[in-house]
Amino acid sequence: MYQVLQYFFRFIARNPPAPVRILVLIVAILVYGTTGFLYFELSANPDLTWLDGLWYTVVTMTTVGYGDLFPKTAGGRFLVGWPVMGFGIGLLGYVLSLIAAAFVTSQTKEMKGMSSFSLKGHIIFANFPGVSKLSRLIEELRLDPSVGKHAAVVLVDEHLEELPPELVNLDVHFVRGNPVRDETLLRASVDEARHAVILTRNPADTASDNLNVAIALAIEGRSRTVNTVVEIVDPASEELLRKAGCDKVVCTSRFGAHFLSQELLNPGVQEVVEDLLSARGGQQLYFIVVRQKGTFGEFVERCREKAHIALGTATAEGVRLNPPVTAQMAPGDRIITIGPSRMEYLD
């Protein structure tokens, strides 16, 4: 008990924090105004009570001034009324300045990536590839109903100094730090995240895959429930990432070669693929879970009834495009379709 009192008088009493200072000032003004008002005005108005004095002090220091109570004596006006109004206005300005300073500090910390976030079901982007690419990714994901237009997004990057205004407008949270470290991932609430997208920082540098492998290992080591998608440059890194437990690996350089060759052989392929992959409109590509046994031909008819075209199946054995209509599908398998909107499942 002695140590507690010693700490109080040494630190709190000598250098009180702002909330304590404000509370002391409010109590002092209330006591001074209440007692002073009654001291000078009670002789002129014997019906006044302590509650009346307190009420007068509150409405005066907040500059409301209802006018139901006011001092009639010179002492009440100049020695109580004016000081209470002056200190009340000053205190109000002081409180507003503290609130504004706290708000600016909070905004600055978040812009600089110094904040920690307590989120759930959000999307984490590791590495900053540029404003344009990241903005398109976020907008595309939020257009899908399974993600939602208000889905929370956290960017984790070690080298970005301040969140760009374009990403601030998209309500992106920013955590600055090494995404390989546990403390950085904890600040981004990785354990409660729904998706983690690990982007390539420099598409021209195959060595950036090494960093992505390390980030993937750090995330998968903390939480196996996070759906992890990793972007790589060198196809040789794909096998290592799959062994690390990543859900999906996307090799941009390999897809670039496919697009170029197909556009040369089949002009117009790029427009078709862009329409299928973009959620902005038109027809999209979907993987829909089936909930009962059946043949591919049976599910083709059910898809047609819902304005979807069945292209193939995705089972434990892999992806098969245009399989025989007699191909068997089990509950939990997925059917690949083209359609105007997402279906959660197919019976």
Image (cartoon, rainbow, N blue to C red):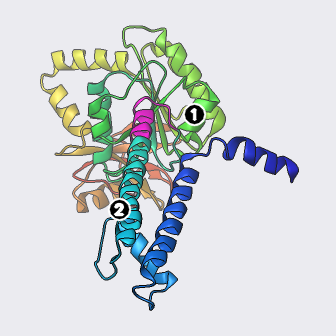
Residue type marked 1: Leu
Q: CA distance from mark 2 to mark 1?
A: 55 Å
Q: Is residue 64 magenta?
A: no
Quarter of the rendering occupied by the N terminus: bottom right
Foreground: 313 or 327?
A: 313
- Spot occupied by residue 249 in the image (x, y as percentages of width and height): 47, 27
Residue type marked 2: Trp
| Residue at the image point whose x is 47% and y is 61% from the top | 291
- Is 231 left, or right, of 260 in this rendering? right
| Residue at the image point whose x is 34% and y is 80% from the top | 69
Q: Which residue is mark 1?
A: 185
Foreground: 310 or 165?
A: 165
Where disc 1 sits, the SS reads: helix
Quarter of the rendering occupied by the C terminus: bottom left
- Spot occupied by residue 91 in the image (x, y as percentages of width and height): 42, 54
Where disc 2 sits, the SS reads: helix
Q: Which residues are magenta?
A: 104-115
Disc ID at residue 45: none
Question: Could you tell which of marks 2 and 1 lies nearer the N-terminus?
Answer: 2
